[in-house]
Every structure is written in C-alpha cells, then in structure tokens.
Image (tube, rainbow, N blue to C red):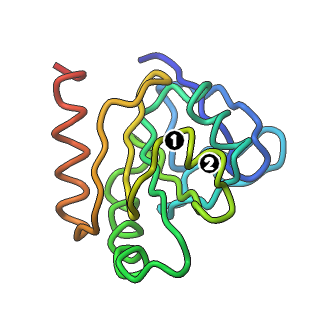
Amino acid sequence: MSEYLVVCSSCGGVNRLPGDRRATDAKCGKCGSKLFSGHPHNIDGSVFDRHINRTTLPVLVDVWAPWCGPCLAMAPAYEAAAQQLEPEVVLLKLNSDDEEEVSARLGIRSIPTMILFQGGQEIARMSGAMPAGQIVKWVRERLAPAAA
C-alpha cells in the first residue's frame, strides 16, 4: 500500500501516512501526538467510530472494564502484543462501562472481548483472556488470508 489513513487516538484527527516512511515516527498533524507508541490507546465512543470507519490499517479493540479480573490480568499481555503488532495493526482499549452504547452496538456479552476490524468490518472476535503470544498469533492468523 503506497499510503494509508490512521486516526489519532488523542484528538480523532485523520492522518495520511506515506507507505515509504517509518510509521513508528509518525505524529498527528492536528495535535502532534505519536500515532504509534507501542501501547494500546484508551478511546471513547466517538474516536472508536472514527477509527473503525477511517483507519485503513487493521484495528484490534480490547473491550474491558475496570472491575473485571480477567480484563486486568490480560492488560499487560495486550500491552506486550501492541509492541509486537504496531504499526501494522492499531491497538485500542474500549471501557465497556464508560461506553455502554458502543458495547451494546457491538453485541458484547462477556469481557474481555477482542474484536479485529479491517476496512470498517469486523473480521474476527475472541472472548476471554489470552497471553501476549496467543494474542499476536490470533491476530496474524486472521490477517494472513487478507495478505495472501
């Protein structure tokens, strides 16, 4: 891909990134925040919708809640997965308590739930906590057919 679009998780600005530049160095043209930090970004509902509809890279969303033991146990693994998957995949965290409408729209029935989106469409979903290596493997296996 010669260029791609990435939504800034801080301000919601849409950024056009040339494919021949290092994405890890990219900063938002609107607010100056790093677009890829090796850490998942906590987002609200409006930025979630913008990411899904405008980001042309795959987007992995961890739907979680602060009272959920398995969610808290998986948080370090999701963080480690971000370091391995970025900048090829955008990793986001959506608090289901704060974003009840989005969680309902997504049909979240248990947490943690990870949903992988590509081209604005859900392509895979997995509920339950996983270690970092399993998260990375799960994502790469689901994206492999698209790359072939």
Q: Residue at x 21, y 36 (%)?
A: 142
Q: Residue at x 51, y 41 (%)?
A: 23
SS assignment at label 2: loop
| Location of mark 2 (residue) | 35
Q: Alpha-carbon neighbours of circle 2 within 10 Å: few (<14), some, or many (≥20)?
A: many
Nearer to us in this view, 90 or 129 = 129
Q: Amino acid at mark 2?
A: Leu
| Foreground disc of the pair 1, 2 | 2
Q: Amino acid at mark 1?
A: Ala
Seen in the image, is 43 located left or right of residue 79? right
Identify the image quadrant of the N terminus.
Answer: top left
Q: Residue at x 39, y 64 (%)?
A: 112
Measured as percent of width and height from the top left, residue 91 is found at 47, 52
Measured as percent of width and height from the top left, residue 65 is found at 53, 71
SS assignment at label 1: helix
Seen in the image, is 142 located left or right of residue 31? left
Do labels 1 and 2 touch, CB within 8 Å? yes
Q: Residue at x 34, y 51 (%)?
A: 85
Query: For the image shown, how many numbered marks are present on the structure?
Result: 2
| Location of mark 1 (residue) | 23
Identify the image quadrant of the C terminus.
Answer: top left
Question: How far is mark 1 from mark 2, CA to CA?
Answer: 8 Å
Measured as percent of width and height from the top left, residue 55 is found at 56, 30
